[in-house]
Image: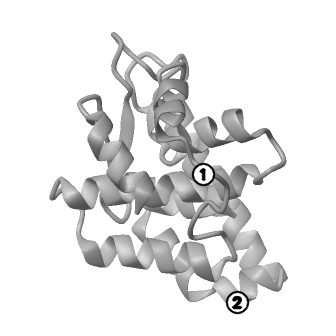
Amino acid sequence: LGEVIKHGVIRDAAYFDFVENRAEAILSVDPAAMAHVVEGSCRIKTSVVAADERETTGVRALLNFGHTIGHAIETIYGYGTLSHGEAVALGMRAAGRIAVVRGMWSEADHSRMCALIQTCGFPTHFSGTTDLDLLLATMKLDKKVKDGRIRFVLPTRIGEVCLVDDVAADEVRAACQE
């Protein structure tokens, strides 16, 4: 479900609206709602992968929204401490906060995304001890690092994101602390 929310944020505002408006039906595994969610997520992921099948243009990297921090959390604290969706949801919240502080994304869209993440039962904060220096060092080992820079997928509006490689360590620390 974390990936479902991600798909709406990165590529399809109408799909995000559907998930937001039908969250209760999705959580109760309503067949019609689930069919729409599965079809929508498959359509979105397929369109992104088809646009950059060999990962040469950067389009496919957009699927990594929330994953830069999410993968670092999974690596440090072990797979199973949090589910992949939980780690990605925390990463989306932090990436969204970075985008808000940079003036790239509205506080209203960030609040909508965070409310949907919470409605779907994901944690709003990591309850474990967070060593931010270790988190940053782990992010530097990620496959998305290019020329020594950690690349982040940051939202600009619901349904649209961009890839940036100039996020400073202090911006990551502040977003993760929040």
Residue type for callout 1: Val
Classify residue 23 as left or right of residue 160.
right
Q: Helix, strand, or loop for circle 2?
A: helix
Q: Residue at x 61, y 60 (%)?
A: 126
Residue type for callout 2: Glu
Q: Can you say whether 30 is above or below 68 in the image?
A: below
**Residue 8, position as x, y percentages in the image:** 50, 62
Q: Residue at x 63, y 51 (%)?
A: 129
Residue 21 makes an appearance in the image: yes
Crowding around mark 1 (Cα neighbors within 10 Å: few <14, some 14 to 19, many 20+) is many
Residue with the most extreme left position: 103
Q: Residue at x 44, y 53 (%)?
A: 176
**Residue 35, position as x, y percentages in the image:** 76, 71
Q: Helix, strand, or loop for circle 1?
A: helix
Classify residue 169 as left or right of residue 112.
left
Q: Residue at x 78, y 38 (%)?
A: 78
Q: Can you say whether 75 is above or below 161 in the image?
A: above
- Reading the image, the residue beneath label 2 is 24
Q: Which mark is residue 88?
A: 1
